[in-house]
Image (cartoon, rainbow, N blue to C red):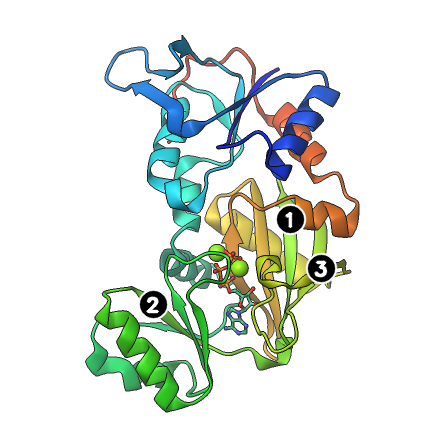
Amino acid sequence: MNIVILSRKSSLYSTRRLREAAIERGHTVRVVDYLRCYMDITSHRPRVLYQGEELAPDAIIPRIGASYTFYGTAVVRQFEMMGVFTVNESQAINRSRDKLRSTQLLARDGVGLPVTGFAHSTKDIDGLIAIAGGAPVVVKLVEGTQGVGVILAETKKAAQAVIEAFRGLDANILVQEFIKEAGGSDIRCIVVGNRVIATMKRQAAPGEFRSNLHRGGYAEKIKITPEERTTAKRAAKTMGLNVAGVDILRSNHGPVVMEVNSSPGLEGIEGATEVDVAGKIIEFIEQHAKPGRQRDKGKG
Ligand SMILES: Nc1ncnc2c1ncn2[C@@H]1O[C@H](COP(=O)(O)OP(=O)(O)OP(=O)(O)O)[C@@H](O)[C@H]1O
Ligand SMILES: [Mg+2]
Ligand SMILES: [Mg+2]
């Protein structure tokens, strides 16, 4: 099969591993910087061009960075218009980048979540804090990543001040129940298709409640419960993601989903679990892409 990996840099660990895994399985693979893709969008024959050349792969693997969601998903959507199989669809990627929208959809489908509130006006701060069960609460930027804009407010006063400051900057924030019993750890589940293929526990650095590896957390392999497995699969399905990194906290009201990532990093999880995650993603493509069907228009 002819596979294109949409990624800014071929030297990134995840990109490198996906490329290797595709080659190992006998595919033709190419890493393409999606910011350098341009498109013929109105013609009867939609096209994506890269350095003057038309791209017509059988499948794409989108690895769209959070800061380039708008353009990156436009490129993915264009491939969908051409009928090219994509590991994750543009709509699902967009959905996953918005914590508010994701939380609403997950709640509708009965996925366990930390109690979460959202408001526009600073006049409603007290009501908002009350929804989250009072201090301590976690205040979160709707579009944050790598733990930036995730703040633990220990007291009501601190929560009020943080919320006011963010709203003063016109930032959209969620206010969430603090899952103290998680003890600064969370569980990353990698879902591919309808299966959880790898799971790791991430523990925050001492004195830190955010378990992100970028913030000095460490990872180890972990076994999850059947309930956690069901939660991870359901979350990925609700988001419409074929490949997802589902982050779960162990709360005293059961597993709760923190967020669902559409381009989960492979380095931490492959290192901690020794599972060939990249290989599983390529296998998924082999099972689901239909080569030579480029002219059927996708759902987009
Ligand atoms: N309500 C909460 N209770 C306890 N811990 C929390 C809560 N919300 C977030 N955390 C901790 O903070 C970390 C970062 O939060 P979150 O994943 O929501 O932010 P992010 O910036 O989107 O991170 P990512 O880089 O994973 O996308 C979580 O992995 C978790 O360890
Ligand atoms: Mg995130
Ligand atoms: Mg996270």
Type of residue at label 2? Ile
Residue 105, by quadrant, is bottom left
Query: Looking at the figure, which quarter contains the C terminus?
Result: top left
Q: Nearer the viewer, mark 2 or mark 3?
A: 3
Residue 159, by quadrant, is bottom left
Name which residue lies at 49% across and 72% down.
Answer: 114
Q: Nearer the viewer, residue 289 or 204?
A: 204
Q: Nearer the viewer, residue 101 or 200?
A: 200
Q: Residues within 10 Å of mark 2 (few under 14, many from 20)?
A: many
- Residue at disc 1, secondary structure: strand
Residue 248, percent across and down? 60, 63
Q: Residues within 10 Å of mark 3 (few under 14, many from 20)?
A: many
Residue 73, by quadrant, is top left
Q: Nearer the viewer, mark 3 or mark 1?
A: 3
Tag 1 near tag 2, CB within 8 Å: no
Name which residue lies at 75% across and 48% down.
Answer: 271
Distance from mark 1 CB to nearest ligand 1 atom below 8 Å: no
Residue 275, percent across and down? 77, 43
Q: Nearer the viewer, residue 147 or 55?
A: 147
- Disc 2: which residue: 173
Query: Looking at the figure, which quarter contains the N terminus?
Result: top right
Type of residue at label 3? Ala
- Disc 3: which residue: 219
Q: Is residue 192 above or below residue 137?
A: above
- Disc 1: which residue: 190
Q: CA distance from mark 3 to mark 1?
A: 14 Å
Residue 49, percent across and down? 38, 15
